[in-house]
Amino acid sequence: MLLSMAVVDAAILVSGADEAFVDQVRALEGACRRRGITLTFQNDMRLFREVFLNLRDPRAHLSPLLDAQVSDLSEARWILGTDAEGQVVTTQAYRFYPDDGSTSYDRWVSLRMLYDRPEEAPPGLSCTPIGEAAEVNRKLRCWLASGGTWVHPDHRGPDSHGVHLSERLPRLSRTLGMRQYPMAEATTSGVLPQLAKAGIAERYGYKSVVPSLTYCRGGRTSDMLFLWMPRQEMERDARSFRARLSAVPVYRAAE
C-alpha cells in the first residue's frame, strides 16, 4: 500500500511512546514550514525514481540500489521536501536489507546489492569491496543502506531559521529507519572521494569512512569511499540528533 504522510506522523508511527522524539521532529517540521518547506514521508519508490531523475542536477546520481526498476524496494522509504509551488527542495532515502543468509560482501560481489537480477546489470560491471570495507562487509548480514540525499542549492548550508537540511535529513531518515527496523546491525552509504574531502560524510554523521568500493565497467575503474555506522553508534548519533532538534525553534501558526 502506498503511503504519504507528514514526517511527524511517521515519527509517531515508528517511535511508539517516545513523545520527546516526536516533539523534536515536530519542531524540525515547523522550522521547515517557516522556510516554506513541507516534508513528507513516502514509500512510493517509483515516484522517488521519477523525482530524482527530474532534478536535472549533474551531481544527483540515482544508485541502482534505490532504483525501483531494477530492485524490489518494498523495504525502502524516503523523505520528500517541497516548497509552496510544489518544487522539489530535498530528498533522502533508506533501504533495509534483511538477512538472507549471505553477507553484504556477497551481495556486492554478486551485484545483488544493486540488482535483483544481476544478469540485467550493464555488461562488464563489477563491484568489489577492498581493504577495510571488505572486512566490514564480510560481517554485515542485516543493515540499512542510506542514499538519495539531495538539497536544492538555495537551501544548502546554515540559515537564519536553524534548518540545516543536509545535516538533519540523513539523521532523521536514519533514526526513522532504525526505529522501523530494530534488527538492523548497521547503516551504510557511499561517497565519492572528492565529496569526502569536502566533509560531506561527517556532515551526514558518519565517523567511519573507509576505502573502498571499486567499480569496474567498460574497462574503466572508479572508487567510492564506504561509509558505515554500527548499531551502537547509530543509537548515540540518534541521541545527538535529538539534542540538535531540541535547539530548533518550535513552529507556531500565529508567528
Image: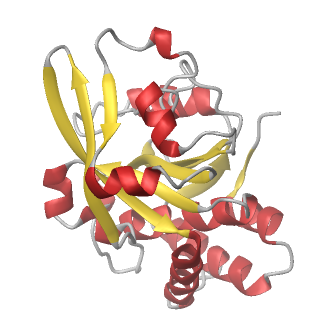
State the residue at coordinates (69%, 38%): 100
Residue 38 lies in quadrant: bottom right
Front residue of this view, candidates 169 and 184: 184
Residue under the image location 79 percent in, 81 percent down: 18
Task: Name the image quarter holding the N terminus.
Answer: top right
Q: Where residue 5 sits: x, y (%)?
A: 73, 51
Q: Which residue is drawn at 40% across and 72% down?
A: 205
On the picture, is 88 further left or further right than 77?
left
Q: Which residue is drawn at 45% across and 26% down?
A: 111
Answer with the quarter of the image where residue 164 lies. bottom left
With 55 as the anchor, is 18 left or right in this view? right
Is 87 in front, or is 217?
217
* Location of residue 19 by image quarter: bottom right
- Quarter of the picture holding the C terminus: bottom right
Residue 77 as seen in the image, left or right of residue 204: right
Give the percent coordinates (x, y) of residue 157. 27, 69
Q: Which of 28 and 148 is in front in this view?
A: 148
Residue 96 point in image, percent of width and height:
63, 47
Give the total of numbered labels: 0
From where the camera sits, is residue 185 visible? yes
Q: Position of residue 52 (x, y in %)?
A: 43, 33
Q: Which residue lies furthest to the right in this view?
A: 17
- Residue 82 in sight from this viewpoint: no
Q: Please determine whether, in this image, residue 16 is positioned above or below residue 57.
A: below
Is the residue 97 above or below the residue 215 in the image? below
How is the rendered protein coloured? secondary structure
